[in-house]
């Protein structure tokens, strides 16, 4: 059966459920603890009528690490935090994607639109952010989340980046309604946070680091079993070895979020073929689908797979890097 063949709505629903599954990592536990501390602290201050400066959380990781998914999952599932919605008069959390290319003025306008107060005429960046803070207070927002926050830097000059730093500090230091800022973004976000020690010390950093085949290989194998069991599939020995775990981790560029995508993609191919057993071939075909690579450039096939760059589309032999890592053996 062609892998592009039509599949039943029931299978589509099963795949949708798999994509909606959330697998917590140690860094997610750190995130929930840091956020819970900030929430408890802020609610205690409000109960006492106090408004000391707020603190923030910086969630940092590579593209595909799962950081944005983790932050969104936390806000959606946290029982005591209400996400901003169009019909709500108040909320606890406002979450926005930083527009790209980002300017301080453009981000402020985006926040105003998201808060339900679109700008009717042109204003300076300073006035726009005064309006943002005023509406955050009016809506009683405790947390302002900015995703893809590394774009706050862009190609801006140091002077412009300092203006961003001062604006973030002013939001957290507002004398009438300080707001905790949650930034999620790529590792370059650290440059912005370290630009001013006064800003950096106000943030708790949470790193969504890469996964490692030595430390995380067994957990990855268990994760595959969890997903294939949820899909009602049997397991082949070809996807139960240490060597396979290392190949899968490399195929996912050592990023947890990409790894989940590859697993679900392989399961989809298995289902499209009406196969009952998840096998190595399904993962091989999923990587081919994602990258368009030739067979000898597929990490599920190639002997020296660590020489391959798994993030490239349509890779060629010129993209292979010398590898001195010996081939791994199965269990």
Image (tube, rainbow, N blue to C red):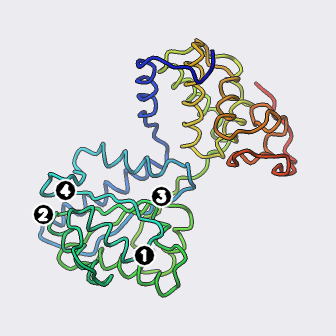
Find out whether the residues at labels 1 and 2 contact each other: C-beta distance under 8 Å.
no
Q: Which residue is mark 4?
A: 91
Q: Which residue is mark 1?
A: 103
Vertical arrangement, residue 158 with respect to residue 186, above or below:
below
Q: Secondary structure at mark 2?
A: helix
Q: Which residue is mark 2?
A: 47
Q: Please state which of the two labelled residues, at mark 2 or mark 4, is closer to the viewer.
A: 4
Residue toward you, 108 or 34: 108
Q: Residue furthest bottom?
A: 159
Indicate which disc, 3 or 4, sits on the residue closer to the N terminus: 4
- Badge 1: residue crowd in 10 Å (few <14, some 14–19, many ≥20): many
Measured from the top left, where is residue 9 in percent x and y? 41, 19
As measured in the structure, the alpha-carbon distance from the residue carrying label 2 to the one carrying label 4 is 17 Å
Q: Secondary structure at mark 3?
A: strand
Q: Residue at x 54, y 43 (%)?
A: 257
Find out whether the residues at labels 1 and 3 contact each other: C-beta distance under 8 Å.
no
Q: Please state which of the two labelled residues, at mark 4 or mark 1, is closer to the viewer.
A: 1
As measured in the structure, the alpha-carbon distance from the residue carrying label 4 to the one carrying label 1 is 26 Å
Indicate which disc, 2 or 4, sits on the residue closer to the N terminus: 2
Q: Please state which of the two labelled residues, at mark 3 or mark 4, is closer to the viewer.
A: 4
As measured in the structure, the alpha-carbon distance from the residue carrying label 1 to the one carrying label 3 is 25 Å
Q: Tell whether 278 sits left or right of 32.
A: right
Q: Which residue is mark 3?
A: 206
Q: Residue at x 30, y 42 (%)?
A: 77
Vertical arrangement, residue 250 with respect to residue 16, above or below:
below
Measured from the top left, where is residue 125 in percent x and y? 33, 82
């Amino acid at each position: 059966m062609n892998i592009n063949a039509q599949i039943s709505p029931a299978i589509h629903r099963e795949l949708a459920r798999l994509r909606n599954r959330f697998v917590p990592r140690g860094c997610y536990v750190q995130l929930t603890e840091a956020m819970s501390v900030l929430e408890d602290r802020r609610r205690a201050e409000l109960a006492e009528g106090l408004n000391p400066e707020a603190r923030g959380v910086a969630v940092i990781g590579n593209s595909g690490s799962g950081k944005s998914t983790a932050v969104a999952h936390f806000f959606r599932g946290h029982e005591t935090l209400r996400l901003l919605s169009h019909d709500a008069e108040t909320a606890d959390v406002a979450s926005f994607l930083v527009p790209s290319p980002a300017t301080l003025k453009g981000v402020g306008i985006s926040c105003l639109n998201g808060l339900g107060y679109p700008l009717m005429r042109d204003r300076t960046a300073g006035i726009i952010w005064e309006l943002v803070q005023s509406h955050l207070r009016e809506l009683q927002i405790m947390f302002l989340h900015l995703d893809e926050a590394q774009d706050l830097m862009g190609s801006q000059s140091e002077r412009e980046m300092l203006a961003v730093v001062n604006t973030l500090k002013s939001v957290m230091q507002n004398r009438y309604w300080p707001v905790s800022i949650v930034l999620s973004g790529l590792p370059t976000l650290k440059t912005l946070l370290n630009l001013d020690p006064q800003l950096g010390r106000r943030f708790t950093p949470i790193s969504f680091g890469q996964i490692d085949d030595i430390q995380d290989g067994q957990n990855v194998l268990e994760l595959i079993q969890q997903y294939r069991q949820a899909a009602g599939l049997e397991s082949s020995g070809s996807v139960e070895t240490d060597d396979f775990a290392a190949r899968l981790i490399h195929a996912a560029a050592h990023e947890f979020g990409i790894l989940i995508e590859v697993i679900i993609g392989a399961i989809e191919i298995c289902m499209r073929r009406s196969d009952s057993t998840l096998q190595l071939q399904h993962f091989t075909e999923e990587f081919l689908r994602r990258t368009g690579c030739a067979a000898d450039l597929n990490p599920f096939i190639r002997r020296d797979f660590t020489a391959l760059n798994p993030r490239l589309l349509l890779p060629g032999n010129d993209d292979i890097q010398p590898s001195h890592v010996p081939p791994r053996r199965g269990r």
